[in-house]
Image: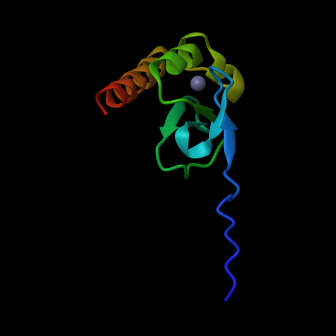
Amino acid sequence: METTSTTNKHIPQRTCVACRQVKAKRQLIRLVALPGGGVEVDTDNRKAGRGAYMCPTLKCWQAGLVAGRLEYTLRTSLTQENRERLIEFGKKLDRELVSG
Ligand SMILES: [Zn+2]
């Protein structure tokens, strides 16, 4: 039996909307523009809708959310509450990375 070791499988890549770095899709967090407005973190990668990707670092989340790059990419606008909720999510991600 022949086993051609093609361990070089195609890895889907995406660009972080904040720092523009191209990374493996699974290294990034997907955010989805909701049909009714606003943006939600798509933790399962299953939500339908226009999506954007960001690194799981607070630096990128702040650039994406505070500087408005995420809104620009998703062609939507965030309410203050929505923005704060997403930034909180980014802060948690950052803490997890630091401790782990
Ligand atoms: Zn980034």
Looking at the image, residue 97 sits to the left or right of residue 21; the answer is left
Rendering quadrant holding ligand 1: top right
- The residue at the point 67 percent across, 79 percent down is 3
Looking at the image, residue 95 sits to the left or right of residue 32; the answer is left
Name the quadrant of the C terminus: top left
Looking at the image, residue 37 sits to the left or right of residue 12; the answer is left
* Label tally: 0
Q: Point out residue 36 in the picture as x, y percentages from the top left corner.
A: 58, 35
Examine the image and state in which quarter residue 58 appears.
Answer: top left
Q: Nearer the viewer, residue 68 or 10?
A: 10
- The residue at the point 50 percent across, 16 percent down is 59
- Could one spot residue 50 in this view of the protein? no
Task: Give the vertical position of 69 relative to 3 (above or below).
Answer: above
- The residue at the point 39 percent across, 29 percent down is 93
Q: Point out residue 14 in the picture as x, y percentages from the top left corner.
A: 68, 38
Examine the image and state in which quarter residue 30 appears.
Answer: top right
- The residue at the point 58 percent across, 37 percent down is 34
Task: Give the vertical position of 25 relative to 96 (above or below).
Answer: below
